[in-house]
Image (spheres, helix red, strand yellow):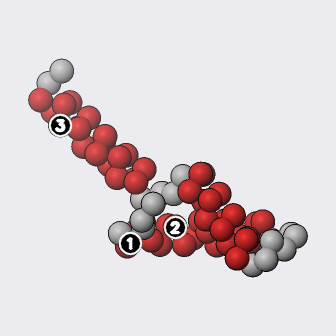
Amino acid sequence: MTRMQTATTGTSQQASSTARTSMPTHEQIAKRAYEKWVKRGRPEGTHLQDWYEAEAELKREMASGSYRA
């Protein structure tokens, strides 16, 4: 491998690593959505609303650096 190939590979790995850390996982979203659902009193039919709200909250928190697992 040439020096140029090594540098390019390292850069793309860093970029994908950064992208992974700023996106919530399925498990993180599911946990947050469940918590939201419980706080609402476990109403029927709000699963999509809870999921989308949880996903948006987590993305904002991760982008700002305020997310704590």
Other residues around mark 3 within 10 Å, as few (<14) / some (14–19) / many (≥20): few
Judge left or right: residue 65 versus residue 4: right
The residue that label 2 is drawn on is: 58
Against 26, residue 50 (above or below) is below
Q: Is residue 48 visible?
A: yes
In this rendered view, identify the residue nearer to me: 14 or 55: 55
Mark before the other along the chain sequence, 1 or 3: 3
Badge 1 crowding class, 10 Å Cα cut-off, few under 14, some 14 to 19, many 20 or more, is few
Q: Which numbered disc flags the more N-terminal residue, 3 or 2?
A: 3
Mark 3 to mark 2: distance in Å?
Answer: 32 Å
Q: Residues within 10 Å of mark 2 (few under 14, many from 20)?
A: many
Name the residue carrying label 1.
Answer: 66
Q: Quadrant of the C terminus?
A: bottom left
Which residue is the site of mark 3? 7
Quarter of the rendering occupied by the N terminus: top left
Precedes in sequence: disc 2 or disc 1: 2
- The amino acid type, in three-letter code, at marker 3 is Ala
Note whether residue 52 is visible: no
Question: Which quadrant of the view contains residue 55?
Answer: bottom right
